[in-house]
Image (cartoon, rainbow, N blue to C red):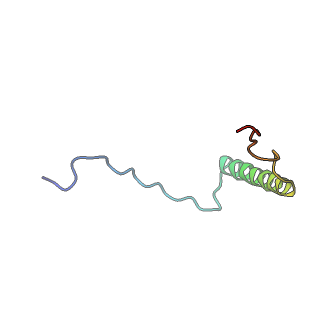
């Protein structure tokens, strides 16, 4: 038997892009991610100022 006959072959590695060679899709993706992160941070700051959304937690009846 030769070394590697069966199983799944590994995909070929693609050449890494340089940071200077960003195309339009990459720039749009980075911009979108930055906007989402900014919105998330604002929402977290807004939510931190308030207490819990529902007061009291689980309500139990007085009956036994």
- Residue 16 is situated, as x and y percent measured from the top left of the image, at 52, 59
Q: Residue at x 49, y 57 (%)?
A: 15
- Residue 3 is situated, as x and y percent measured from the top left of the image, at 19, 56
- Residue 2 is situated, as x and y percent measured from the top left of the image, at 15, 54
- Residue 63 is situated, as x and y percent measured from the top left of the image, at 74, 37
Q: How many marks?
A: 0
- Quadrant of res 13: bottom left
Which of these two is toward me, 31 or 19?
31
Q: Residue furthest front?
A: 64
Which of these two is toward me, 46 or 25?
46
Q: Residue furthest left?
A: 1
Q: Residue furthest bottom?
A: 19
Q: Residue at x 82, y 46 (%)?
A: 53
Which of these two is toward me, 26 or 8?
8
- Quadrant of res 50: bottom right
Q: Residue at x 87, y 57 (%)?
A: 49
Quarter of the image with the C terminus in it? top right
Determine whether, in the image, residue 45 is placed left or right of residue 16: right
Q: Residue at x 75, y 54 (%)?
A: 37
């Amino acid at each position: 038997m030769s070394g590697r006959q069966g199983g799944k072959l590994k995909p070929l590695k693609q050449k890494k892009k340089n940071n200077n060679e960003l195309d339009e899709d990459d720039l749009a993706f980075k911009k979108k991610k930055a906007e989402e992160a900014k919105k998330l941070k604002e929402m977290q700051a807004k939510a931190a100022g308030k207490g819990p959304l529902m007061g009291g937690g689980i309500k139990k009846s007085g009956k036994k």
